[in-house]
Image (cartoon, rainbow, N blue to C red):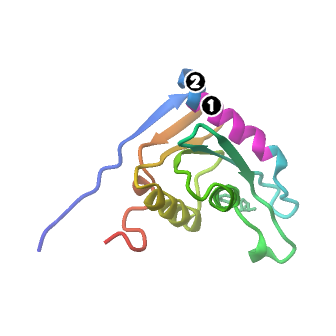
Amino acid sequence: MNRHSLNIDYIQSPKDHLDRTDALLVVKATEAAQNAYAPYSQFKVGAAVLLDNGHILTGSNQENASFPAGICAERSVIAYTHANYPTSKISAVAITASPCGICRQVLLESEKRAGSPIRVLLINENEVHIFKSVKDLIPFGFDSF
Ligand code: THU
């Protein structure tokens, strides 16, 4: 029997201390939240993805009267990204919330496709929490053994 423990290393940074790329990604995710369609929860979420070619794509949550048919901001932009840029790798993602479990699993798959860690920026009012890999947000995700 072996005992293990996990350590999650992340950076907590004021928004105005970010480097240029991170700051841009945060602005894009925040702007994208304005396009959310959230008449049921009134909770608007924006997400911005940075590709290895420097392009930034955005998404937002899109709800539906049939509640389970709604989609989170993260999955809206991730599906769009892989559908339109199938050979590009996602290098970073910024989100104006902390992602739900399903989105974490989906992000994990994007990281697997990229073959290198995806930097994750979780945005709140004044600061950003920065993780170096999706794995830090979903240890023991499906298929991780
Ligand atoms: N939502 C997201 O877009 N991303 C998350 O990570 C968590 C939740 C959305 C789903 C729903 O439209 C609203 O926020 C309230 O749950």
Q: Is residue 126 above or below residue 55?
A: above
Residue 119 placement (x, y as % from top left): 48, 44
Q: Label 2, on which residue?
A: 20
Residue 139 numbered tag: none
Residue 102 occupies quadrant = bottom right
Q: Vertically, is 105 above or below 53?
A: below
Question: Which secondary structure class fits the magenta region best?
Answer: helix
Q: Is residue 45 visible?
A: no
On the image, the x and y values in percent for residue 107 come to: 53, 59
On screen, residue 10 versus residue 98, left or right, reads left
Q: Is mark 1 within 8 Å of ligand 1?
A: no
**What is the quadrant of the C terminus in the image?**
bottom left
Q: Which residues lie in the magenta part?
A: 22-33
User: How crowded is the residue under tag 1: few (<14 C-alpha within 10 Å), some, or many (20+)?
Assistant: few
Q: Which residue is mark 1?
A: 126
Residue 39 placement (x, y as % from top left): 88, 60
Q: In the rendered structure, does residue 14 fall within the stretch colored magenta?
A: no
Residue 88 falls left or right of residue 58: left
